[in-house]
Image: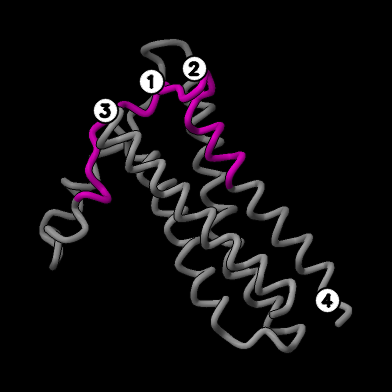
Amino acid sequence: MNFFRKTVLFLVVLSIFAACGSFISQYVLGMNPCVLCILQRLCVLAVGLLAIVTAFSSQSSKFARSLSALLIAAPAVYGAGVAAYQIWLQSLPPGTAPSCGAPWTFRLRDWPLFDWFEPIVRGFGNCAEPDYLFGVALPVWSILYFSFVVLLLLWAWLKTRKI
């Protein structure tokens, strides 16, 4: 198994832990996720799903590794942008932050199979009120995760592009 594939499999495991942490913070610790938190959760799930798909695809050519890295990095970059926006919202003075929109359960309630994916998108929290884990705001944890994913992919891609 080549180094790039091992790195992508590591990202699968890391994404599983990050997604489990998201669900534990909601359903065990009682933190109510907001719309932006749920977008970040969906980006973590997308990183994990794309990492699974690319881990079991052919990685023999430079083009395949480049395409895999771009596919996995796309939701990570988007998730980092959402987290940065949420950190900006949380830095505004109280009462001046704009609304982050209708809850996902309201937006998607008429979709087919909504009952199946409703626990993933459930949450009515306020985007401007920070929740903390180990003294660090949750969007900061998200930026750290997404940045680590992108930097690890870049490092693995650079290390294997000469092969």
Q: Earlier in the sequence, mark 1 or mark 3?
A: 3
Amino acid type at image mark 4: Arg
Which mark identifies residue 161? 4
Q: Residue at x 13, y 68 (%)?
A: 112
What is the CA distance from the residue labelled 3 to the residue labelled 2? 24 Å
Q: Earlier in the sequence, mark 2 or mark 1?
A: 2
Amino acid type at image mark 2: Leu
Q: Earlier in the sequence, mark 3 or mark 4?
A: 3
x then y, percent, for residue 98: 37, 26
What is the CA distance from the residue labelled 3 to the residue labelled 4? 45 Å
Front of the two marks 3 and 2: 3
Report the residue marked by disc 2. 92
Which mark identifies residue 30? 3
x then y, percent, for residue 150: 67, 55
Around disc 4, counting alpha carbons within 10 Å, would you say few (fewer than 14), some (14 to 19), or many (20 or more)?
few
x then y, percent, for residue 106: 16, 46
Q: Residue at x 71, y 72 (%)?
A: 4
- In front of the other: 88 or 120: 120
Of helix, strand and loop, which one carries label 2?
A: loop
Amino acid type at image mark 1: Glu
Q: Quadrant of the N terminus?
A: bottom right
Front of the two marks 2 and 4: 4
Q: Which residues are magenta?
A: 119-145
